[in-house]
Amino acid sequence: MATFTYKAKVKGKTVTGEVDAEDEKGAIAQLKSKNIKSPSVKKKPEGGGFWANANKKPVTGKDIVIFTRQFSTMVDAGLPLVQCLDILGKQSDNPSLGGVVLKVKANIEVGGNLSDSMRKHVEVFDALFCNMVEAGEAGGILDIILRRLADYIEKAEQLKKKVKAAMVYPGVIVTVAFGVVAFLMVFVIPTFAKMFEGGGAELPVPTAIVMQLSDFFKTKWHIMFGGIFGFIFLAKKTYGTERGRIEIDRFSLKVPVVGNLIRKVSVAKFTRTLGTLISSGVPLIEALDICARTSGNKIVEFAIFNTIEAIKEGETVAAPLSRETVFPAMVIQMIDVGESAGSLDTMLEKIADFYDEEVDTAVEALTSLLEPMLMVFLGLIVGFIVVAMYLPIFKMGETV
């Protein structure tokens, strides 16, 4: 498939846009099927390869939140969709997002609807976004849906930040520890090595180990870095396979402390996504399908798919979820109450708010646990190196 740009007259107006097709004839046929006659079609240049992609600014969650809020305000004010998208596309601070918005506008100008036009750009507008927009278009409440979407994305971004914050501290400590050890091994230990070589005495075992490590750091550092990068590459390749991802996701839920945090994040994400979709008018089965595909964890995904199959056979949401080990009993009970009271969406929002606070608590607990452990770990490593270097000196003192 290639991308073609086109220019044509539609009802006296000049319209431009892009279309994906196998060749130029296919592009013209597509445009004619949309009542665009006599279009001028050109194949779009590839765009400069690696460096063009490297310089392309990624679209962040913050960009989407700002776009969605502004779009909601404009729709609420009664502006036509095409005009809204034209203004937002041209005034966007992110050129990548602006370009996509203008492509959506161009597709609407030739007869497409908003949700289908957005589905052509999955790198920016995910399934949840497009399905909610479709529900808003069908119900005539697009402005309300866009506001809900902005709220949802904001809260989802806050959840991501909490998890990232929990990982920053241990990452910094491990990096500093590696840097300190590397400095000692490359610059400090060799000085001691020269001094010990002239002594002629047999070195203590800890000292010999440190000397060997120092030699490894100096002469075989490429093997060490190759091993690290090889491990990362292998882990990514394994996670890229269906079986590998299942096993890694299953293991991650069982890791002490960290597994509890992952479980709480998954519950918060699932309940907020499902609650937002249901309150926006998306059918339950379709909403659960989106929740499964955006869960980020294969075990959670399978649990939701099992629930979908059970609902199709006439069960409630709570009953099949109770048979899965991923979701806590309290969550199941609250969902059951919400279903019985006919206010499932409201109950799901309450569960999500509760688990957002639980994630905060879990992040604090993880940080407070890791801080002393990592400091002790760093102290032991540096302490072992220092003691190993001074052991021969103590031995010489005893001999004298």
Image: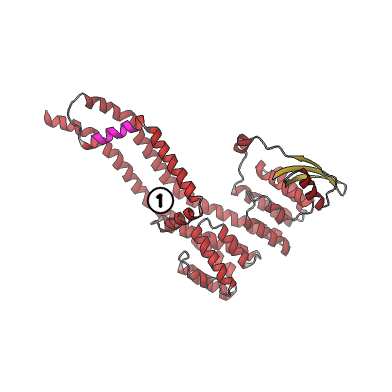
Judge the density around disc 1: few (<14), some (14-19), many (≥20) Cα neighbours within 10 Å. some
Height in image: 330 above or below 225? below
On the image, the x and y values in percent for residue 319 come to 51, 73
Residue 205 in sight from this viewpoint: yes
Please name the colour scheme applied to the rendered image.
secondary structure
* Number of dots carrying numbers: 1
Does dot 1 land on a helix, a strand or a loop? Answer: helix
Residue drawn 49% across the image and 72% down it: 333
Write the start and end of the magenta stretch as one range: 207-216
Q: Quadrant of residue 54?
A: top right
Magenta residues, dominant SS class: helix
Height in image: 161 above or below 145? above
Find the residue positioned furthest to the left: 400
Q: Quadrant of residue 144?
A: bottom right
Height in image: 32 above or below 292? above
Identify the residue under disc 1. Answer: 367
Let me know if residue 214 is in the magenta part.
Answer: yes
Residue drawn 69% across the image and 44% down it: 98
Using residue 358 as the reference point, say whether residue 25 is left or right of it. Answer: right
Residue 93 in sight from this viewpoint: no
On the image, the x and y values in percent for residue 150 come to 63, 55
Find the residue positioned furthest to the right: 12
Let me know if residue 392 is in the magenta part.
Answer: no
On the image, the x and y values in percent for residue 37 come to 85, 48
Residue drawn 54% across the image and 68% down it: 307
Dividing the image into 4 quarters, which one contains the C terminus? Answer: top left
Q: Nearer the viewer, residue 156 or 258?
A: 258
Q: Which amino acid type corresponds to the residue marked 1 in the rendered image? A: Thr
Q: Nearer the viewer, residue 135 or 127?
A: 127
Dividing the image into 4 quarters, which one contains the N terminus? Answer: top right
On the image, the x and y values in percent for residue 135 come to 69, 62
Residue drawn 31% across the image and 45% down it: 376
